[in-house]
Image: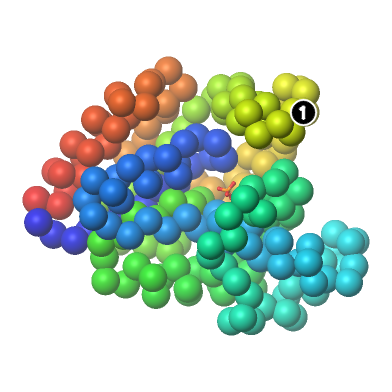
Amino acid sequence: MKKITVAIDGYSSCGKSTFAKILAEYAGYTYVDTGAMYRAIALYILQHCPSSDPEERLEWIRHNLNDNIPLMGLGDAIRTLEVGNLASQIAVVPEVRHFLVSKQQQMGERGGVVMDGRDIGTVVFPHAELKIFLTATAEVRAQRRYKELIEKGTPMSFEDVLRDVNDRDYRDTHREESPLRKADDAVELDNSNMTIPEQVEYLTKLLDERRK
Ligand code: DC
């Protein structure tokens, strides 16, 4: 079977990473979580930038991108709301995007990779053999994240979680530099009312068709 490139894009909390991991395991491919790379840079800013002013932080990272910034293997440290919000703010900075996109392209140049993010099918791998665009309503996604936060012991009100989801959606889809959008040739899957096994069945079938 061919070693193809699989691009999974979509809104936050749609389950992109869940399905990307399952597909990678199923096919024996490498899984790359590009959101984690944006989060890693956000964490680096929180740890090293002398200012907490939003504009100064963006200016600082423009001048401090370098190959020594740890981008992987940071575990739960990058999974906080603070890091997620800052990641979404720095994702509008063209220098940050160019820096990470070129790293992502290197990671996937030989195929056999499942990459999830916001711009994988449109910018990182516009020629990917399989592009999936995952969606679900903001309420369903806020409910999923609300449950996760309660399980982690860091509860927030549902209204705050929903507001956060809407803010992030707005920023992801309205930024000037590679905004989140469905690639023309992507398969769209709204999973608001689908179970995980239903989605796995649908997606593994698609993958098998494309790599024949
Ligand atoms: O998927 P996530 O929540 O871990 O992503 C964190 C932020 O990074 C999100 O607000 C959007 C941004 N991001 C991006 O702009 N492009 C990507 N390919 C992946 C993530």
Q: Residue at x 24, y 30 (%)?
A: 201
Number of numbered discs on residues: 1
Q: Is residue 4 visible?
A: yes
Q: Residue at x 63, y 39 (%)?
A: 169
* Residue 29: percent from left, percent from top: 27, 57
- Give the quarter of the image for residue 43: bottom right
Q: Where 147 falls versus 89 (above or below)?
A: above
Q: Where 107 falls versus 24 (above or below)?
A: below
Whether ligand 1 has any atom under 8 Å from the Cβ at mark 1 is answered as no
Residue closest to the far top: 193
Q: Where 83 falls versus 19 (above or below)?
A: below
Query: Which residue lies under the disc numbered 1?
Result: 156
Q: How did the renderer colour the structure?
A: rainbow
* Residue 17: percent from left, percent from top: 45, 44
* Residue 154: percent from left, percent from top: 74, 33
Question: Looking at this view, is 124 or 175 the one in front?
Answer: 124
- Give the quarter of the image for residue 182: top left
Q: Is residue 179 left or right of residue 161?
A: left
Q: Is residue 130 left or right of residue 189?
A: left
Q: Residue at x 85, y 59 (%)?
A: 54
Q: Is residue 132 visible?
A: no
- Give the quarter of the image for residue 99: bottom right
Question: Looking at this view, is 121 or 103 the one in front?
Answer: 103
Q: Is residue 23 left or right of residue 183?
A: left
The type of residue carrying mark 1 is Met
* Residue 168: percent from left, percent from top: 67, 42
Other residues around mark 1 within 10 Å, as few (<14) / some (14–19) / many (≥20) = few
Q: Where 73 falls versus 103 (above or below)?
A: above
Q: Secondary structure at mark 1?
A: loop
Which quadrant holds the N terminus? bottom left
Q: Residue at x 37, y 40 (%)?
A: 19
